[in-house]
Amino acid sequence: MKKVSIKTEKDLIDEILSGKYRDSYLIYNRKSTDEADNQKNSISYQKSENARYAYREKLSIAPITIKGFSADGIISEKHSGFTEDNDISITDDGLVQYRIDRPKFQKMLQFVSQGYFKGIVCLCWDRISRNKGDDTLVRKLMRKGIDFRFVYAKYEKTSSGALHMDIDGMFSQHHSRVTSEKVTLTIKNAREKGICTYRAPIGYLNLGEMEHKPLDPERAPIIRQMYEYYVTGDWSLSDIARYAKEQGFVTVPMRRRRTKEEMLAEEDEFDEIEKTSRPVNENHISRILTNPFYTGKVLNSEGKYIPSNSHEAIVSDELFNQVQSVLKKKKVSVHYVEKLDQPLRGIVRCEHCERVYTPYTKKGIQYFNSRCVNGCENTFKNFNFTFIDKKIEGLMNGLYFTDEEIEQMDARTGTDIALFEEKRRKELDQVERKKKKIREDLAYIRSNKLSLLKTGVYSPEGLMEEETKLNSELTILQNQEQSSDIAMHETMKEIQKLSELVKNVIPYYKFANPHEKEKIIRVIFSELSISQNTLNYKCKKGFECFENRFVALCDPTENRTQIDGLKTRCPNH
């Protein structure tokens, strides 16, 4: 019996890159997020119509199944074709880049643009694109030779066919714009009438109708009781949360957010996500007690609360305002009148989330702690002063020129000056030519003032303004001519003096107390940041020459590399 080998995704990718499917097509289906009730554009309908077309036209569909991309050569995704990313970048060499929002569509275009597939089969133009950016990409690929086949249309390679394509593209975009405007206008008008156009909070039932948000018979009485208990001042938020749990009060059942894997999966790969409820906590109670919705009000189009025509109040305005007063009295914020004088306060940050490391003292030792944001990659939350002190000391040892580097600089200065003088000579020649041209223009204006005024070429004010402008340009060119070539020598001398000062301050730094060390650190560094066990830095203006000097002395193509937890500029230093 012959053994059948199962191809992995890596094998399929290798086959694609090898050119195996250069004569095959892919089928692309897209379901719009704003067309939930349009069965004609459902994924199943598109699959059957596209497959029937491919069979009728004898088109070979690439039999590839890649998770998160295609199933037997059929690509299906639920995504708006109208929305697009507004971010754009234009490089110096004319390359324009922008982000494609549809992940499967982006991967498909990437493959076909490199010639790994012959073309795409799609139901109609508005399934492939409904915005100008994606529309332009598809047209460029068509001109490049990629064969886009549409079940409902055939675009001839004539001026009439191009017009047909333009009209379809225009109407697909127009349809989305009209739909967007209608939805926006409908929501705005409904909100002005006091209709709830958004999901009602816990305590009300969302039955799919904006005009009717009835009370939840189980949760509404408990919410009313929460207000009544809290207004007495004897109940805390945690007490209310405990009471709610005892009453079996839980959040409304809701589906969790789909993972990225589930968003890219085919319709039949995952079961429908089950709705679940969660016990309430203090945050839930706080949101309930501060939401004016429970007084029978809704947000209008300007974000202000107005009387609602969609739901009735659970609590009165009087009770709601009393609860707000109690909340305000219990709200206590801690503000320190005088901050403790701890070294390096506010200068050390997390490299990833940029939260500040706060200094504190424990058992006579100074520590630093950062409360990073949730999901921050940096796991190095605590360290003591000695840790960062040693890091900075090692870092400062690399922020001055060694004797060997100074010798290299002196040796190169002569060559650099010679190159500079040659460049300077060429610049002076250009300046002289510009001066000559300006003098000729001035001479012409001065000798032909009367004729220029009579013929109306210049008004008196315009003539004076032009003459002043030419004189100003001549003065600027003369000042450029007088600039000194010795400036480069002087700059190198100043840098070497600064290097010597940094070198001399290191012994003092070693024996200084923490506050004295802080003063030295703040003079040299503008930023210090921690990423895991690594100290990153940014020098203040004037010291940047030491931070960047290794690029000039070593290979200019090298990037920053980490050595012993410190970031320097040259891996061979």
Image (cartoon, rainbow, N blue to C red):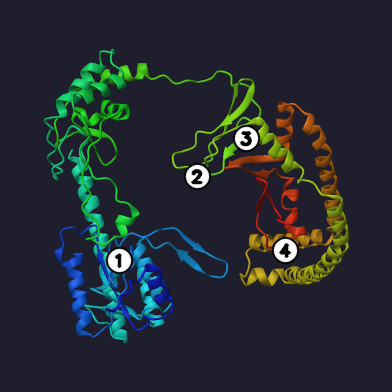
Residue 470 — which label? 4
Question: Which of marks 3 and 1 precedes in the sequence?
Answer: 1
Residue corresponding to mark 3: 347
Q: State which quadrant residue 448 falls in.
A: bottom right
List x then y, in percent, for residue 9.
37, 68
Q: Do the residues labelled 1 and 4 touch (CB within 8 Å)?
A: no
Which of the two residues, 459 or 119, is positioned nearer the viewer here? 119
Q: What residue type is labelled 4?
A: Leu
In this picture, residue 226 sits left or right of residue 439: left
Q: Image height check: is 74 above or below 559?
A: below
Q: What residue type is labelled 1?
A: Arg
Question: Which of marks 2 and 3 precedes in the sequence?
Answer: 3
Residue 359 — which label? none
Could you tell me which secondary element the residue under label 2 belongs to? loop
Q: Which amino acid does label 2 sit on?
A: Glu
In this picture, residue 457 sits left or right of residue 400: left
Q: Image height check: is 526 above or below 100?
A: above
